[in-house]
């Protein structure tokens, strides 16, 4: 049965011997400290410096969208990269979050800051209900089921025009805090940055904890994980719900930021885009997820100059990168760097 | 015939017609999956290319039979190129990576088509006129008969190919155990190439057959591809009979669902049913249930 | 009182009866070996006992509680652990992390605590890491602490299986051919580990082809042939059993 093979595993691996010296070079605490603390510091520096380089609203728009996508992708990476469960329907959860904010604020007069957690709660419950039966499936069957969930959400949003505005989409009001309207790129830059930093921090924490090791273990050797006492179903459900909630939060932010939502937020293509960001940046790498989100959000903007050739070039880049860097950008490049350092 | 029965027949005819198309697309998925364990998300683009290229050749004044042959041949070349240039170099990649490669190929082919053939909707002429035939009080278009006939013919040919020719058996052997197939002297990389060529042929034929009914467009392959994948999963991935039954079933569910329940939710219905089936049969209707060897 | 009791156990794959009408008991604190020719059903029996497979008929009791059909993770909670003949290593993790997965049930796994990295999590992980490193050194993996599992040679992975199983601190430990593929020196090391574990009071069930190892450390031996019990008893009894000599040892 086709399953997602854990990263770092290849059928034709060359036997390697590790010297004792190499094995004891750094304690795992030191290794993780450098990735956790070092990576986190880099992210904070980038976030602090970036506004100095942004000169107009359009650039802020792109960067805020990178941040919003990155929140989804960090969550999706926990599901796909670490737990090895594919989802081709996460745009559905993103859109549900967006529409929850839109509907609760416009139709029920709720405050935006209340609509967001309510939407996330609803999406979390929905994900919990469907997770158990869906996650019994594996490989391409799971891909089909999640794809189906996403499409159904997409269709429902398009058809129930009385509630959602239908294919034309609907307007979302800005959030008001103490008489101050949260509006425009510079304000949203800091909001999204704060949520992103939180998402990355939680993700890094989880991966290097007993629960996170259980997730990675069920990916690497599911039966062995169960024998070690890991309730694999429970952990799969948990990470599915967690990633859905993160997508929902990002969706709510996107809705308030752009002040408009359309059903294509839930489209199959949007789901694929999120998955591509995960794989592009590098599965099972939190910072890879950030790079993937940045590259694939920027790419269409950069390709816009090529007008009608945009899609051809996008498709070509997706193919070429995946063929030559099947492990994604960050793991491939850091692997190269490591090899170079080892040689010198 | 009483009116409700006639109405039912009408839904039945249209369900079987689109079901046959889904079955062809699903067979394409199954073929490639069997030979390579790859799910080819560009399968829908083969369908699109079949219709669009036929239209393009027709508009150049070429006769329909020749245009069809040309479109099928071109689509097969695209299928072979996809295998050779994109799938073979990535042989040992993860399943998700391969999915993204084929999706990238799909986006590329859609982009290429929109650039070269435009973004307009085109209808192909029906193969033998638009005079509806009356059958048991309901009507059926001659094109539907073409679809059913050609699909049935293809199924018979495929059955013969896999059961009575050495090449067909080689493909089956490769799908069961690639290493063993290689050991008995089967040229596995040729089998993979062949499976993509055959899948492209099936897709192109489906696209040409359906184009006179639904018209064709550079994005027509997206939904048809997803429905074909859904049909293949419904039947049980890699199972030929399953793909055909899955396709017909999907067509019937849609048509009856749209007719009796809600036409708004025609597209959603198929996926609701598939989720329901997968909840109870995690390997589809005819899929094998594997035991994990540890 | 027996620790493990198997009654009338059978499993069928298609038409093949891999295990047929098997009865046996295992007493606590003993080393119990299961031997038999290839294809006799030894690994299948392990998969049945540990809940990986569901038996077609029959019952399994652990501590006199019926556990037939329970999932492996539920059995792990009751103190069962095992290794795999066909390695089941998490190739996406480091060697140490593999062993730490073995400690899963001993650690605080609360999701919120893990997400927020509460001090309790850090503390627990620190102690676990120390214990697991000790364990790895004990089975001769001191040089592989931070190695990626995917880059380790076969012999080291076999021992990694054992370290992971031991990390769970089981009361019942099933070892599936722990010495297969190891050289004489490595076999001897593993041999010593098993003896030490058994001496510490852990009940050990061993599937092994190395007769010297089996005869040397077993209290009790069960001989399987074509999924059926051919003989059982002390090493002495089994060695002198004519049926065993004819069917199995005679061929060696």
Image (spheres, coloured by chain):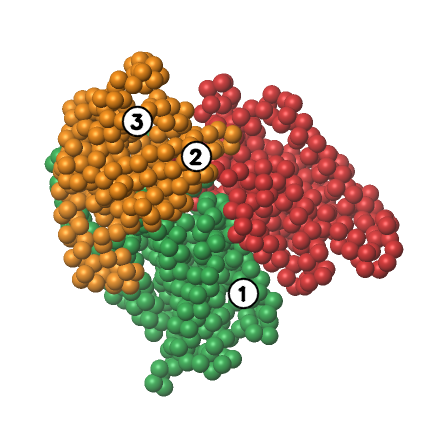
Chain colours: A green, B red, C orange
- Callout 2: chain: C
Is residue C185 placed above or below A308 in the rendered structure?
Answer: above
* Residue farthest front in this picture: C1
- Identify the disc placed on residue A263: 1
Give the answer, above or below, for where C177 lies relative to B266.
above
Q: Is residue B79 visible?
A: no
- Locate the C terminus of chain A and report the quarter of the image it occupies: top left
Q: CA distance from mark 3 to mark 2?
A: 18 Å
For residue A74, what is the image quadrant? bottom left
Where is residue A91 shown, x and y percent of the image?
47, 59
| Lateral position of residue A298 relative to residue A340, left or right | right
Q: Is residue A24 left or right of residue B191?
A: left
Q: CA distance from mark 1 to mark 2?
A: 55 Å
Which quadrant of the view contains residue C119?
A: bottom left
Which residue is identified by label 2?
Answer: C10
Please rate how many residues cluster around mark 3, counting C-alpha atoms within 10 Å: few if below 14, some from 14 to 19, many from 20: some
Helix or strand or loop: what does disc 3 sit on?
A: strand
Who's the residue at 30% across and 40% down the image? C4
- Closer to the camera, B288 or B172? B288
Give the residue number, with chain letter if any, for mark 3. C232
At mark 2, the secondary structure is: strand
x, y percentage for residue C48? 38, 38
Most foreground residue, A200 or C210 = C210
Query: Quick one: SS at disc 1?
Result: helix
Q: Which class describes the residues within 10 Å of circle 2: few (<14), some (14-19), or many (20+)?
A: many
Q: Residue at x 41, y 36 (%)?
A: C8
Taking the spot 44% from the left edge, 35% from the top edge, the residue there is C11
Q: Earlier in the sequence, mark 3 or mark 2?
A: 2
How many residues crowd mark 1 within 10 Å: few (<14), some (14–19), many (20+)?
many
Query: Residue B236 vs residue C194: left or right?
Result: right
């Amino acid at each position: 049965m086709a399953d997602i093979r854990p990263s770092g595993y290849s059928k034709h691996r060359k036997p390697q011997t590790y010297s004792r010296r190499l094995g004891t070079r750094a304690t795992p605490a030191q290794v993780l400290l450098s990735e956790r603390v070092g990576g986190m510091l880099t992210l904070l520096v980038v976030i602090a410096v970036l506004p100095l380089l942004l000169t107009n609203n359009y650039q802020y728009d792109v960067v805020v969208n990178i941040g919003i996508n990155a929140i989804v992708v960090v969550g999706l990476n926990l599901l796909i990269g670490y737990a090895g469960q594919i989802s081709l329907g996460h745009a559905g959860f993103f859109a549900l979050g967006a529409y929850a904010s839109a509907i609760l604020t416009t139709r029920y007069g709720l405050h935006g800051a209340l609509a967001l957690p309510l939407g996330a709660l609803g999406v979390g419950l929905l994900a919990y209900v469907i997770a158990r039966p869906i996650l019994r499936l594996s490989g391409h069957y799971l891909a089909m089921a999640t794809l189906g969930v996403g499409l159904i959400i997409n269709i429902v949003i398009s058809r129930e025009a009385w509630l959602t505005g239908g294919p034309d989409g609907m307007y979302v009001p800005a959030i008001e805090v103490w008489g101050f309207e949260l509006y425009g790129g510079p304000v949203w830059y800091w909001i999204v940055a704060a949520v992103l930093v939180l998402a990355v921090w939680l993700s890094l924490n989880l991966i290097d904890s007993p629960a996170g090791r259980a997730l990675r273990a069920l990916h690497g050797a599911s039966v062995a994980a169960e024998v070690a006492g890991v309730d694999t179903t429970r952990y799969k459900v948990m990470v599915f719900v967690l990633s859905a909630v993160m997508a929902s939060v990002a969706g709510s932010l996107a809705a308030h930021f752009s002040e408009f939502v359309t059903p294509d937020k839930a489209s199959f293509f949007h789901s694929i885009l999120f998955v591509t960001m995960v794989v592009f940046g590098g599965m099972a790498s939190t910072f890879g997820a950030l790079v993937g989100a940045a590259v694939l959000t920027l790419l269409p903007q950069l390709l816009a100059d090529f007008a009608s050739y945009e899609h051809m070039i996008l498709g070509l880049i997706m193919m070429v990168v995946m063929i030559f860097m099947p492990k994604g950008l960050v793991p491939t490049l850091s692997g190269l760097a490591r090899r170079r350092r080892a040689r010198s | 015939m009483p009116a409700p029965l006639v109405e039912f027949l009408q839904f039945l005819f249209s369900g079987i017609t689109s079901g046959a198309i889904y079955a062809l697309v699903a067979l394409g998925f199954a073929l490639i999956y069997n030979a390579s364990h790859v799910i080819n998300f560009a399968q829908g683009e083969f369908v699109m290319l079949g219709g669009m290229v036929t239209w393009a050749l027709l508009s150049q004044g070429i006769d329909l039979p020749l245009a069809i042959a040309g479109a099928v041949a071109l689509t097969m070349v695209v299928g072979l190129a996809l295998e050779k240039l994109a799938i073979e170099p990535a042989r040992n990649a993860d399943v998700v990576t391969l999915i993204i490669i084929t999706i990238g190929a799909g986006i590329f082919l859609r982009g290429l088509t929109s650039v070269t053939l435009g973004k307009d909707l085109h209808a192909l002429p029906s193969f033998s006129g638009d005079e509806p035939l009356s059958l048991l009080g309901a009507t059926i278009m001659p094109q539907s008969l073409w679809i059913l006939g050609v699909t049935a013919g293809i199924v018979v040919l495929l059955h013969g190919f896999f059961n009575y020719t050495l090449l067909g058996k080689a493909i089956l052997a490769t799908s069961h155990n690639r290493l063993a197939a290689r050991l008995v002297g089967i040229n596995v990389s040729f089998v993979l190439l062949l499976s993509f060529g055959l899948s492209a042929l099936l897709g192109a034929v489906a696209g040409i057959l359906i184009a006179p009914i639904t018209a064709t467009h550079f994005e027509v392959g997206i939904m048809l591809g997803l429905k074909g994948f859904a049909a293949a999963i419904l039947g049980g991935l890699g199972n030929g009979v399953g793909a055909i039954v899955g396709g017909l079933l999907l067509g019937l569910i849609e048509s009856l669902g749209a007719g009796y329940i809600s036409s708004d939710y025609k597209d959603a219905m198929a996926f609701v049913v598939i989720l329901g089936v997968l909840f109870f049969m995690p390997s589809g209707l005819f899929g094998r249930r594997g035991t994990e060897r540890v | 009182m027996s620790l493990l009791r198997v009654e009338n156990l059978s499993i069928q794959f298609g038409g093949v009866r891999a295990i047929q009408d098997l009865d046996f008991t295992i007493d606590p604190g003993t080393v119990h070996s299961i031997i038999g020719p290839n294809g006799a059903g030894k690994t299948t029996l392990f998969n049945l006992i540990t809940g990986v497979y569901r038996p077609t008929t029959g019952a399994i009791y652990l501590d006199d509680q019926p556990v037939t059909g329970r999932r492996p993770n539920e059995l792990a909670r009751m103190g069962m652990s095992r290794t795999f003949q066909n390695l089941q290593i998490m190739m996406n993790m480091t060697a140490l992390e593999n062993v730490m997965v073995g400690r899963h049930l001993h650690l605080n796994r609360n999701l919120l605590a893990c997400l927020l990295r509460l001090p309790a999590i850090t503390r627990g992980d620190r102690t676990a890491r120390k214990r697991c490193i000790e364990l790895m050194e004990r089975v001769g993996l001191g040089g592989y602490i931070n190695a990626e599992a995917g880059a380790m040679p076969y012999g080291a992975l076999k021992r990694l299986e054992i370290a992971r199983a031991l990390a769970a601190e089981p009361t019942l430990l099933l070892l599936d051919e722990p010495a297969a593929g190891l050289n004489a020196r490595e076999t001897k090391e593993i041999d010593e580990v098993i003896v030490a574990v058994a001496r510490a009071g852990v009940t050990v069930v061993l599937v092994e082809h190395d007769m010297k190892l089996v005869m040397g450390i077993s209290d009790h031996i069960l001989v399987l042939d074509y999924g059926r019990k051919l003989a059982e008893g002390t090493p002495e009894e089994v060695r002198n059993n004519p049926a065993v000599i004819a069917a199995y040892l005679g061929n060696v």
